[in-house]
Image (cartoon, helix red, strand yellow):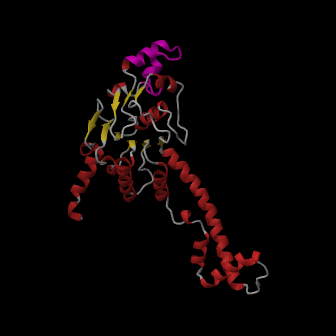
Amino acid sequence: MLYLERFDLPTANDELNFVFDDLRLDMTCYQNRNGAYPFHMFPQRGLSKISFAPITVFYGGNGSGKSTLLNVIAEKLNLSRCAPFNQSPFFEAYLSKCKSYIPSGTGVPSESRIVTSDDVFEFLLDFRSVNQGIDRKREQLFEEWETLRKDGSFRLQSLSDFEELQNRNRAKRMTRSAYTHRRLPDNLIGRSNGESAFGIFQDRIRENALYLLDEPENSLSVKLQKQLATFLEESVRFYGCQLVISTHSPFILSLKGAKIYDLDSRPVEVRKWTELENVRVWHEFFEEHKLEF
């Protein structure tokens, strides 16, 4: 399913016209790559038009513009987001010169959103705070278990005492760990940062919508990256999603049918995942050590 067919960025002429028209900006500022961000980022890469597939991937090294592209597209389409992102005074002007092409009669579904690394990081910070509270609760339950097992003076006097009686009976027949595990929230027990991060994508990617994912492999183990790749493929194949992803992960780069823009090439080209430099380095590394397996 395609909710976004094409996206046009300002050409070099568009950007120069902006320089001449905007009194805030002089040529020296424009020629400084960071002076008028995000102007001056993509014409030098020969990138002005992006056509999309059900899965489109932006690949490139640090500073190649992967995250910038996602943010530009997300803001132009007014997609939902959680964490704020850095903007320059020229960001809105840049957006005004971008064009998005939506299939006629469809529109971008309201559930569509961008999920960034900052979203995941903020969630993990919140989750860690919750877990700290859970740790305190765990210590309290340890003490409660010991007290309930030792104190034999309790007598049931009314229905309001029934819950305490149940707790006392559990404490007597259960080990400390079993008692504590039963009393803690099930969804917070035993989840690592990676498992929690993976849960974000499972929770936020729903049916029939457009999703922009900024390096979703961050915080994920290799095993979870592979599981995420399967989840993303199924979201497109069975649940009508369209994905635009920035990534370094070989597992995500190898998604079936993915259209990959190599932002490290000049000009930017669409490549097979097996042609990308990072993937080739991994391949050569394992070839060198294949006799050790």
Q: Position of residue 118 (x, y in %)?
A: 51, 45
For residue 33: magenta?
yes
Measuring 27% from the left and 44% from the top, which residue is drawn there? 273
Measuring 23% from the left and 59% from the top, which residue is drawn there? 289
Locate residue 115 relative to residue 136 in the image: left or right: left
Locate residue 119 relative to residue 63 in the image: left or right: right
Q: Position of residue 90 (x, y in %)?
A: 51, 24
Locate residue 274 relative to residue 227 in the image: left or right: left
For residue 189: magenta?
no
Q: Position of residue 70 (x, y in %)?
A: 43, 36
Quadrant occupied by the C terminus: bottom left
Residue that sits furthest to the bottom in the current view = 152
Report the magenta residues as a range.
13-39
Looking at this view, is 93 or 61 the one in front?
93
Q: What number of labels is visible?
A: 0
Looking at this view, is 209 or 24 the one in front?
209
Q: Position of residue 192 (x, y in %)?
A: 49, 61
Residue that sits furthest to the front in the current view = 105
Task: Classify 242 as above or below 251.
Answer: above
Measuring 60% from the left and 73% from the top, which residue is drawn there? 180
Quadrant occupied by the N terminus: top left
Residue that sits furthest to the right in the current view = 157
Measuring 47% from the left and 32% from the top, which residue is drawn there? 77
